[in-house]
Image (cartoon, rainbow, N blue to C red):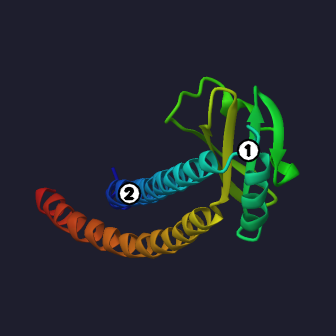
Amino acid sequence: MNNKIKKIVLFLGIFIPALVVIILLSYIFIDKNFNSNLKLHVNLNAKELDGLNSNLKTIVTNGSYIASIDAYGTAYKELDRYFVLYNKEKLEYTSNDKFNDLLSLTKDLDYNSYQYVVKGLNKKHYICISTRLDADNVLIYIKNISDIYNEKNKLVRTSAIMIFSFTIIIFIVAYFISKTLTKPLVNIKREMT
């Protein structure tokens, strides 16, 4: 094998694994951060929904939650938060018509439990969390969580810049290591011939 090929093989043997490790670590970090933020939002919104559930149960009028939920819906609309109420799996109320297709969140829902889904709409992301108010009614609370997606995008951009920077550094280091390690081999080969 010629010396240039040995240098290239050694260079690639250092460069490629180092680059793969950096990319994998970046992906793991971003994914773990995103999942942690999403879980935090789910827990916070579930607690918020618990509070709303308790308040709604104390102010039910004529066995209907609609008037109370409408009052909350009007107040929360400015915060980009919405409500949907299903009664016996039929849509009873929605504070935003774009969220009238969440029937799947009412299926197999026990008391004191939650189901959630993240839904993309108009370049925004919303978390939709459902809870059972009583045997017939399921309330779905919808909140904009685009901030965690924006944070994820920032992390991806920052990671891309870091990976590019590390690629240049690894390239230079791998070049000098491959050059330094092959030089003694060339000298030994010369002495043997």
* Identity of the residue drawn at 69% across and 57% down: 125
Relative to 168, is 113 above or below? Answer: above
Q: Is residue 4 left or right of residue 49?
A: left
User: Which residue is painted at 57% across and 63% down in the image?
Assistant: 148
- Work out whether residue 167 can be spotted: yes
Decide if residue 105 is on the left or right side of residue 178.
right
Choose between 8 and 61: the one closer to the eye.
Answer: 61
Nearer to us in this view, 17 or 26: 26
Identify the secondary structure beneath mark 2: helix
Measured as percent of width and height from the top left, residue 68 is found at 73, 53
| Apparent side of residue 63 relative to residue 100 in the rendered image (left or right) | left
- For badge 2, the amino acid type reads Leu
The residue that label 2 is drawn on is: 25
Helix, strand or loop at mark 1 = loop
Q: Earlier in the sequence, mark 2 or mark 1?
A: 2
Where residue 28 appears, as percent x and y from the top left, is 41, 53
Q: Name the residue located 67 percent from the left edge and 36 percent from the top edge.
A: 138
Q: Nearer the viewer, residue 130 or 5?
A: 130
Quadrant assignment, res 87: top right
Name the residue tied to disc 1: 65
Looking at the image, which residue sits at the far top? 108
Q: Quadrant of residue 149?
A: bottom right
- Based on the displayed image, in which of its 4 quarters is residue 153 positioned? bottom right
| Residue 115: x %, y % from top left | 58, 37
Number of numbered tags placed on the structure image: 2
